[in-house]
Amino acid sequence: MAKLTLTDIATGHGSKDLYNANNALIEAALENTLSRDGTTPNTMSADFDMNSNDILNGGAAAVASLTIGGVATLPTAVAIAPDASDVTNTPAGDIVATDVQAAIDELDTEKMAKASNLSDVSNMDTTRGNIWKKGADIASATALALGTDGNYFDVTGTTTITSISNKTVGVVIKLHFDAILTLTHHATDLVLPGGANITTAAGDEAEFFYYATGDWRCTSYTKADGTAVVSASVTTKAEQTADHTILAADLSAHLIIPVDINTTGSVDITELALGSMSGLVTIKLETDNGDASARKVRLMTTGAAERWTGFQKGDFITLAYDGTNAIILAEKCTIFVELFKTANHVLGGTTTDVKTFNSNYSADKNSGGLYDTATNHRYDAPPFAGRYAMEMWCSPDNWASYATPELYIAGANIITKSTVNRGSAGEDHFGNWVVDVAASAIVEFYSSSEHATLSVVMGDAAEDESYAKLRLIERIR
């Protein structure tokens, strides 16, 4: 319908009423148009249809609602303006803001904190401050409640602690204790060094790692007085003079069993079954019965197998038991004989004459009674296979006569030392070797003549001294 319809005037003598009616219509139509300069009335009383045309060069639009493409994009009574606080936000993740502007502010705050940390990485002191932050003091409690303002806390009070509040898995905290209290060990919730409760002292510090939900592990504990939080438990038995079986109650971090073989005789120390053995065990011979004694101390298995034997004061063995194995960590086993001649021991005047020590020599000292002084005059076998340090002294009695000390093991010549020339009274020569000896191997020491024509006299019947002085076998590891 037309916005303005005038009545035509047919003649020049038309009625003034028609003129006035047309003017009224024109005035009403103008009153119903929009004014460019804002002259009122200048408001719409019905919808404004652009007929798909554009509004050009528009400014701010204040509307009660806005529909674009048939979709409402703004709620009623929201003004279109450049203000993100008017746009709602649904909180998610670590963002708690309910409008866009507040959410942007949160992100900016976190971004600035991270930028500060990154820029300070080259500064060691600042970097350390970013990693460790002192929080407010927290009061001790059965369930210790950690603050959210740091990861290093002073713990006040004396209440026993049995658990610590939850954090994100992987978090590390450090606690500084201001007073005496008890930390209660738990197999999963609060794992402490040594698997036992800890009584704190003022100044003690503990570092904890949150390794699973609800579970903390103490990875470091430092006592203010510098002592260890778990002291190594050493148990030393009284000196044993008779056979003894190790007691389960005696086992500790290190069990030491001293032995006396002088009072009553040889002593056997017997293990428990390996499944019941744990920690370190040391057997040491404290008191022997003299150099010529056949007495000994033995470490025996539950199956009556000889694991180790000692003969002289100072002999020892230290083993580590893990419930399955017995591992020898260190040991010493001393075996020696000292022979005194009772008659001349003459090597014939040939370079092939080899004599072992014989009945012309008596044993003044014979550790463990292992040297056969009656028949073979040799070590028929050391008590164990192993590596031994061996020494031999000998001295020919002739002026300008020669003898060579030699070592045979299982019938094979192992070592021949350089020729001995007595030269003058009291001049001894010795050989020392380190050799591997198999189980049940015969060990023999010989002297051989190195002179084609002269007999070599080993010793002199008129002299009270030995010239095959000392043979020593000491098992080493």
Image: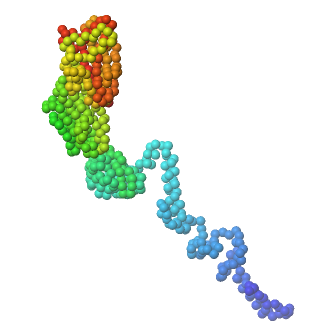
Q: Looking at the figure, which quarter contains the C terminus? A: top left
Q: Position of residue 284 (x, y in %)?
A: 23, 33
User: In screen coordinates, is 26 left or right of 101?
Assistant: right
Q: Looking at the figure, which quarter contains the N terminus? A: bottom right
Q: Quadrant of residue 282?
A: top left
Between 430 and 348, the residue placed more toward the observer is: 348
Q: Position of residue 23 (x, y in %)?
A: 76, 87
Q: Quadrant of residue 82?
A: bottom right
Q: Residue at x 69, y 78 (%)?
A: 49
Vertical placement of residue 101 versus 50, above or below: above
The residue most toward the right is 12
Q: Position of residue 27 (x, y in %)?
A: 73, 85
Q: Residue at x 32, y 29 (%)?
A: 438
Vertical placement of residue 328 versus 155, above or below: above
Q: Residue at x 18, y 34 (%)?
A: 267
Between 121 and 223, the residue placed more toward the observer is: 223
Q: Residue at x 30, y 22 (%)?
A: 390
